[in-house]
């Protein structure tokens, strides 16, 4: 609660500067403690004292008022104790929930890292499988032609070579642009 008060308490100067003098009420004015009983109405003194009625009645009235005020103080202390107990329980629940949230976030992070590692592993395996399939195809082509590669075999690979060359050329241009851009920035 102290953090909330520090974060939400604004100075009067800021309120005046922003034009909130009449419409804005601070959070402290709006807060109410519902645990405490309603305030006891204090009786300053008996009216009988002014009229010079018997002193005994005045003493009896004061004793009743003091008993009522003691009962009121007891009720206030009891309500205060109850509100403090509730506040402590709320703090305990909050700390438990924070620990649970942190544990869940750590578990989620671990799970996402494992999932990412598995995805990378699957990609690596797929790459290895494609490489092995390509090697098997080239070996089967060599065995079909008697170990001597044919000119048509190179013709099929030339389109893929063109793609690789185009990709390398684009990456080279992008790299040069990056190098020139970094030299101007730094």
Image: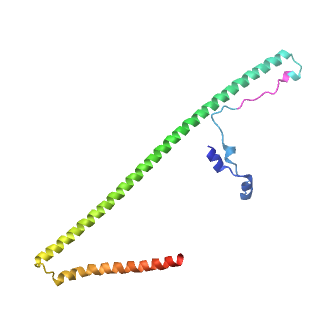
The answer to which of 26 and 183 lies nearer the viewer is 183
| Viewport quadrant of the N terminus | top right
Quadrant hosting residue 129: bottom left
Residue at 68% x, 45% y is 28
The percent coordinates of residue 53 (x first, y second) are 87, 18
- Helix, strand or loop: magenta stretch: loop
> Is 149 left or right of 101, judged from the image as shown?
left
The answer to which of 120 and 78 lies nearer the viewer is 120
Q: Is residue 125 magenta?
A: no
User: Does the rendering let one see residue 22?
Assistant: no
Residue at 26% x, 81% y is 159
Q: Residue furthest bottom?
A: 151
Q: How is the image coloured?
A: rainbow
The percent coordinates of residue 26 (x first, y second) are 69, 48
The percent coordinates of residue 77 (x first, y second) are 66, 29
> Is 163 left or right of 153, judged from the image as shown?
right
Q: Which residues are magenta?
A: 39-48
Q: In the image, is residue 18 above or below residue 5? A: below
The answer to which of 97 and 143 lies nearer the viewer is 143
The percent coordinates of residue 45 (x first, y second) are 82, 25
> Is 69 left or right of 91, judged from the image as shown?
right
Q: Is residue 44 magenta?
A: yes
Residue at 53% x, 76% y is 185
């Amino acid at each position: 609660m102290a953090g909330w008060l520090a974060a939400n308490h604004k100075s009067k100067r800021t309120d005046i500067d922003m034009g909130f003098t009449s419409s804005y009420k601070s959070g402290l004015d709006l807060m109410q403690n519902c645990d405490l009983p309603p305030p006891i109405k204090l009786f300053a003194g008996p009216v009988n004292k002014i009229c010079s009625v018997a002193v005994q009645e005045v003493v009896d009235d004061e004793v009743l008022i003091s008993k009522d005020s003691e009962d009121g103080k007891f009720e206030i202390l009891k309500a205060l104790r109850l509100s403090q107990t509730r506040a402590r329980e709320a703090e305990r629940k909050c700390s438990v929930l924070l620990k649970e949230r942190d544990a869940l976030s750590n578990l989620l992070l671990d799970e996402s890292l494992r999932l990412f590692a598995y995805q990378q592993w699957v990609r690596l395996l797929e790459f290895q499988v494609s490489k092995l399939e390509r090697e098997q195809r080239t070996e089967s082509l060599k065995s079909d032609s008697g170990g001597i590669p044919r000119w048509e075999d190179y013709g099929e690979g030339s389109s893929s070579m063109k793609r690789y060359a185009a990709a390398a050329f684009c990456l080279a241009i992008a790299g040069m642009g990056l190098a020139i851009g970094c030299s101007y920035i730094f």
